[in-house]
Image (cartoon, grey):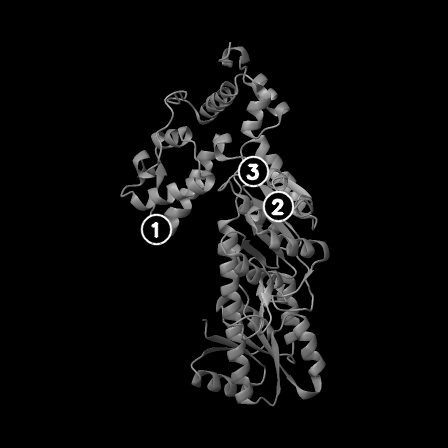
Amino acid sequence: MNKKILVVDDDPDIVLMLTDRLESLGYSTIAARDGEQALEFLESEEPGLVLLDLEMPNLSGMQVLERLRQDKGFEPETGTKSGLWEGDSPHPPIIVMTAHGTIQRAVDAMKCGAYDFLTKPLDVDHLTIVIEKTLERESLQRQVAYLRHEVESRYSTIVATTPEMHSLIDLAKRAANSDATVLLLGESGTGKELFARSIHQWSTRRSMPFVVINCVALTNTLLENELFGHEKGAFTGATALQKGKIEAADGGTVFLDEIGDMHPDLQAKLLRLLQDREFHRVGGTKFVRVNIRVLAATNRELTKAVKAGQFREDLYHRLNVVSFSIPPLRERPSDIPPLAELFLQRSARELGKLNMHLTKETIETMLTYPWPGNVRELDNAISRAVVLSTEPAISPEHLRLSKEPSKDLPVLENLTYHDAMDQYGTYFVEQAIRRAGGNQTKAAEALGLQRSYLARLVKQKNIDITELDDSR
């Protein structure tokens, strides 16, 4: 915590009293005699807090606040400069000092960005309490901002090189502009949570909570309590009211991961929540209203689960307002090298390893591996490789992949990146059509593509379908 305090007052007796008191409490002090000097010290000394007199000649305290807000991007709500994590230094919180007869001026100053105010003559005990509380709040705000930045930066990048992925991103951005429920489909590890977080960040709710709830990680009873909370006395051990995650997300976004595995009893309560935006806590009778946006994800085929009676049809339709399927990594091999580089740089930075890089052989190995665990498996493999490697170069053995690459893959040696991607993409489509016995409709279904899109790929890559029909 920065314990340097800037005291700004044109009265030398007040400055002396304040600096003596503050230094006796362990703070270091800087004194400015007017507003102009205060602005200079704010830039050069970077104090942790400012005590600012409102009534000064030449440049008043109010004018100092106005100057900060206009010239430096001062944020009245937080007392900090906008762009904190883009390399800018925050402004310190400002406590204004004013006489009893000018309380309205102090209120105006707080609207302009001041954190609190003190009235003259100053009570030194009250002064101490206000300063301690202000610095404590500032420290907590910085911690929250830092942690939020860390989370957002980890989930900030959707790597997309294929037209299909770019289309999904465009769809997600359009969906983010509304409060419509979004259903994300795809295999485990394809990046459904990343898309959900991105939708939240692109929405007007970005400053409110993003709450993740895993619907398969807990038993039915525990999940209900996790979602909705409980009233005091609802069950043995419920000694106090506890709010659930739905309530904690009020104003923000709730992400229901693995929604396809939710117990049928809870599905009915979730349906009520989606319909009316209200629920009651476990053991409660009073409905609680919330303003939330719901995103859901599953790796199950919900249409089959509905037919099998394992998932409510009405809930499915409530969730399926906007939906899209994220393709597995094996269907977008061109994304593997940039994803691997992203994960490599992040892991290397966290471990303090410099100049880490992937060898050409390592990239070829990654391109020939099917990645059953998708992007999550790739991330884990790269992180493991960075940990195990004692040299800057990441070699194939560091990846420790569980399966040998296919022997029928095209030779990618001595090819440029784009040529290698083109050859591998052609091979991948050919193999899918061959497995489908030349039936493009079945091949498209197996690949998770539209029949028309597969036909365009076949034409684009000059694939001879007749040579891929093994039944001939």
- Judge by depth and name the residue closer to the eye, 116 or 44: 116
Q: Residue furthest top?
A: 472
N-terminal of the pair, mark 1 or mark 3, is 3
What residue would you read off at disc 1?
A: 352
C-alpha distance separating marks 1 and 3: 33 Å
Question: Are the residues flagged by discs 1 and 3 in contact, CB closer than 8 Å?
Answer: no
Coordinates of residue 182 in the picture (x, y in percent): 64, 46
C-alpha distance separating marks 2 and 3: 21 Å
Coordinates of residue 380 in the picture (x, y in percent): 40, 44
Q: In the rendered view, would you say 462 is above or below 238?
A: above
Q: Residue furthest left?
A: 390
SS for dot 3: loop
What residue would you read off at disc 2?
A: 311
Question: Within 10 Å of the Cα at label 2, are there few (<14), some (14-19), or many (20+) other Cα atoms?
Answer: many
Say which residue appears at 46% left-offset and 38% top-offset.
Answer: 374
SS for dot 2: loop
Question: Within 10 Å of the Cα at label 1, are there few (<14), some (14-19), or many (20+) other Cα atoms?
Answer: few
N-terminal of the pair, mark 2 or mark 1, is 2
Q: In the rendered view, would you say 232 is above or below 353?
A: below
- In the rendered structure, find residue 156 and report the number of the disc placed on it: none
SS for dot 1: loop
Question: Within 10 Å of the Cα at label 3, are there few (<14), some (14-19), or many (20+) other Cα atoms?
Answer: some
Question: Are the residues flagged by discs 2 and 3 in contact, CB closer than 8 Å?
Answer: no
What residue would you read off at disc 3?
A: 326
- Judge by depth and name the residue closer to the eye, 233 or 162: 233
